[in-house]
Image: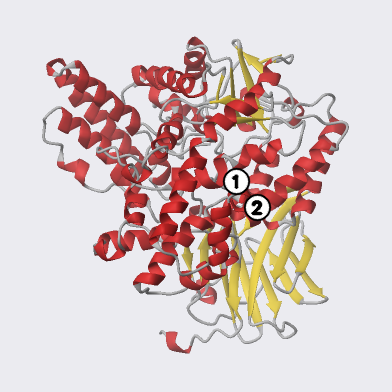
């Protein structure tokens, strides 16, 4: 469970995601577990989340920009504030959240609002973030959802009071479940930094020799130590005991960072299977299913494929079928490996809004299956720590994202962020002797906040958010604050945005005209696909990092008779795939196509309910006849798999909608 520190120099949170995930996920996730007696799990709660969640205990509108504006009379908002509130209130996931609340759906589709409509939009947005627990157990939430429209100011006040009281009980609930031995609780270094990069920027090159590192790097070891020690202090102050285990931010480890964690009394950590495979120079998954001892540190390595099925794939499945599939995959491991310990580790909050009903139906089915399976029992990490462990003699550097650090260093924007930290740190070292202890303490807080991994996540072209400029401004505000505290004019560089002003257009271009390409599996003439829609899969990741699959771009379009798709792929990765699944909704079409991508050329024609052609040589092409389809709008989804493993789901953001009655006559071009 993690959110970055959204507070600016004034201490006001500039974005509302801590509050919104608190009412949707931070209580619901352990509550869903507790409903199934006998199950156990570990919950990792990061310090920035702890600090900010406590700011909602009393008068939260004084600490949260969104709530302060939410309680204001709409007529008092200036244009900037109004536009920002509209952007926030229209940011909910459409298919699984907005469309499920009819009144919200109606307002969401409008382009302008009168005051009453905008007021309702604000209320419905917050209601849409209420999780299953609140929708089931809070009379206020249930009544307001049923009311749907025509809210008044007293509704806002009563809703905020209800939600504030709810948030106040979250950490007490965690302590209660720990005392019942249902969960164990761990944490992360203070501001969620990538510890190996703080200690030595060259660790990025150890993990991936082609990574470009920032100019004139310096070691931030003292900061790294503070990040660990202060996290432990905050954790004990909140939960009443010292944490035994840490999830290093983003599963980022190397030998030096693990040694530092060990020196600070941390007994166990977890990371990704890729780190184990590189450490052993072997990709044999038989090595994965046990805990390890590396220099007296207990280490767990996540099963990447199983974890990502929950994080990314099962949201498209019927819940009971997904739960059954997951249990069958565990059964296969049980049949092949004696006394296997399988580690499922995933994002605790960002995946569930892409499931129907906030993933409640999926987890209910999954937990029921796990509870009724006699050869299986669940453990939390306190249990794992007591198990026999296999010795690990060396530890590769990397993270749970592709086994490297390129998500936080390498791109020129990411490097620019680090370089600004280094320059500011050097300037501080030259002036700190003239500062009093209180000022130095404040400056240290800003440096530690600037080292948060989240800022670097949004720099570069590998992730996208509509709030990129806000994240960029928050990052730079910490360094500006350092100069202000030193009473030195901040360099002009700190007032220039690092991030480029990107939008969703950068990863998804809609079709502009009819197309009629030849389907031969060859990436031939560029002109065949002029006017098609394009999805840049390598740019679509947001709060969660999608598994790196073989498809980097999707081209799509139509003419009067056919719908066309082309997939630009990494050829070598594509050769791992054996099955292409085509899903078309709302007609319920679901077909598997067996393709050997290792051969020189593949072509097949399927004639059944729907006729379609598939060709592959140096990229994958599909043509679908539309004559037998009696629908105006179709939603397409694709899965590439090998055996039981789903390698990639396309498009990664859900489905591609094609309107069979598209008219491109107003978009002629020469």
Depicted 330 relative to depicted 257: above or below? below
Seen from this angle, which residue lies furthest bottom? 665
Residue 386, picture quadrant: top right
Image coordinates of residue 111 in percent, x first then y, are 40, 74
Image coordinates of residue 303 in percent, x first then y, are 68, 34
Image coordinates of residue 241 in percent, x first then y, are 53, 17
Query: What is the CA distance from the residue labelled 1 to the residue labelled 2?
Result: 7 Å
| One can see residue 507 in this view | no
Disc 2 crowd rating (10 Å Cα; few below 14, some 14-19, many 20+) is many
Secondary structure under badge 1?
loop
| Among the two numbered marks 1 and 2 on one chain, the one whose residue lies closer to the N terminus | 1
Disc 1 crowd rating (10 Å Cα; few below 14, some 14-19, many 20+) is some
What residue is at 29 percent from the left and 37 percent from the top?
Answer: 11
335 horizontally vs 204: left or right: right
Residue hosting label 2:
648
> In which quadrant will I find the C terminus?
bottom left
Disc 1 + disc 2, Cβ < 8 Å: yes
Relative depth, front residue between 557 and 47: 47
Residue hosting label 1:
547
Relative depth, front residue between 201 and 315: 315
The numbered dot on residue 597 is: none
Secondary structure under badge 2?
strand
Image coordinates of residue 40 in percent, x first then y, are 71, 30
Residue 221, picture quadrant: top left
Relative depth, front residue between 112 and 645: 112
| One can see residue 261 in this view | yes
């Amino acid at each position: 469970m993690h959110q970055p520190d959204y507070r600016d120099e004034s201490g006001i949170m500039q974005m509302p995601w801590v509050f919104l995930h608190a009412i949707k996920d931070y209580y619901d996730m352990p509550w869903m577990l507790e409903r199934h007696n006998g199950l156990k799990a570990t919950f990792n709660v990061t310090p920035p989340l702890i600090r900010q969640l406590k700011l909602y205990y009393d008068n939260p509108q004084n600490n949260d920009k969104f709530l302060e504006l939410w309680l204001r009379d709409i007529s008092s908002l200036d244009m900037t504030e109004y536009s920002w509130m509209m952007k926030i209130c229209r940011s909910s996931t459409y298919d699984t959240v907005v469309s499920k609340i009819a009144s919200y759906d109606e307002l969401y589709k409008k382009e302008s609002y009168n005051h009453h409509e905008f007021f309702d939009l604000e209320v419905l947005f917050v209601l849409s973030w209420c999780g299953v627990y609140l929708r089931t157990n809070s009379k206020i939430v249930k009544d307001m959802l049923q009311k749907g429209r025509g809210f008044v100011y007293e509704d806002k006040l009563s809703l905020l009071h209800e939600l504030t009281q709810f948030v106040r009980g979250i950490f007490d609930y965690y302590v209660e479940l720990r005392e019942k031995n249902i969960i164990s609780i761990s944490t992360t270094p203070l501001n969620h930094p990538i510890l190996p990069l703080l200690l030595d920027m060259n660790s990025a090159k150890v993990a991936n020799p082609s990574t470009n590192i920032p100019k004139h790097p310096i070691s931030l070891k003292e900061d790294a130590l503070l990040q660990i020690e202060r996290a432990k202090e905050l954790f004990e102050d909140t939960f009443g005991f010292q944490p035994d285990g840490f999830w290093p931010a983003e599963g980022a480890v190397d030998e030096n960072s693990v040694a530092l964690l060990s020196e600070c009394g941390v007994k166990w950590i977890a990371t990704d299977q890729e780190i184990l495979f590189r450490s052993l120079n072997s990709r044999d998954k038989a090595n994965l299913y046990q805990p390890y001892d590396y220099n007296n540190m207990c280490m767990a390595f996540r099963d990447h494929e199983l974890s990502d099925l929950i994080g990314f794939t099962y949201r498209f499945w019927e819940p009971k079928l997904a739960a059954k599939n997951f249990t069958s995959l565990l059964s296969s491991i049980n049949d092949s490996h004696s006394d296997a310990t399988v580690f499922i580790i995933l994002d605790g909050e960002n995946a569930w809004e892409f499931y129907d009903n906030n993933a409640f139906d999926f987890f209910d089915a999954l937990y029921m299956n796990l509870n009724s399976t006699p050869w299986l029992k669940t453990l939390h990490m306190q249990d794992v720590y007591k198990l026999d462990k296999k010795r690990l003699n060396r530890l590769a550097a990397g993270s749970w994202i592709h086994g490297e650090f390129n998500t936080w260093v390498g791109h020129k924007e990411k490097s620019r962020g680090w370089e600004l930290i280094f320059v500011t740190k050097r300037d501080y070292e030259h002036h700190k002797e003239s500062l009093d202890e209180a000022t130095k303490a404040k400056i240290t807080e800003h440096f530690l906040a600037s080292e948060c991994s989240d800022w670097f996540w949004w720099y570069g072209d590998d992730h996208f958010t509509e709030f990129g400029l806000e994240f960029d401004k928050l990052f730079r505000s910490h360094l500006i604050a350092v100069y202000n505290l030193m009473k030195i004019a901040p360099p002009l560089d700190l007032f220039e945005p690092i991030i480029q002003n990107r939008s969703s257009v950068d990863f998804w271009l809609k079709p502009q005209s009819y197309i009629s390409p030849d389907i031969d599996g060859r990436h031939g003439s560029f002109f065949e696909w002029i006017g098609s829609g394009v999805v840049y899969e390598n740019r679509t990741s947001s709060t969660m990092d999608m598994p790196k699959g073989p498809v980097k771009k999707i081209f799509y379009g139509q003419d009067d008779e056919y719908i066309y798709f082309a997939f630009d792929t990494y050829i070598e990765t594509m050769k791992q795939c054996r099955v292409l699944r085509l899903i078309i909704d709302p007609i319920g079409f679901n077909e598997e196509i067996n393709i050997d991508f290792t051969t020189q050329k593949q072509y097949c024609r399927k004639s059944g309910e729907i006729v379609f052609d598939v060709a592959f040589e140096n990229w994958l092409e599909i043509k679908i006849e539309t004559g037998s389809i009696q629908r105006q709008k179709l939603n397409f989804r694709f899965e590439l798999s090998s055996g039981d493993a789903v390698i990639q789901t396309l498009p990664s953001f859900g489905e591609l909608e094609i309107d069979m009655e598209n008219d491109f006559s107003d978009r002629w071009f020469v």
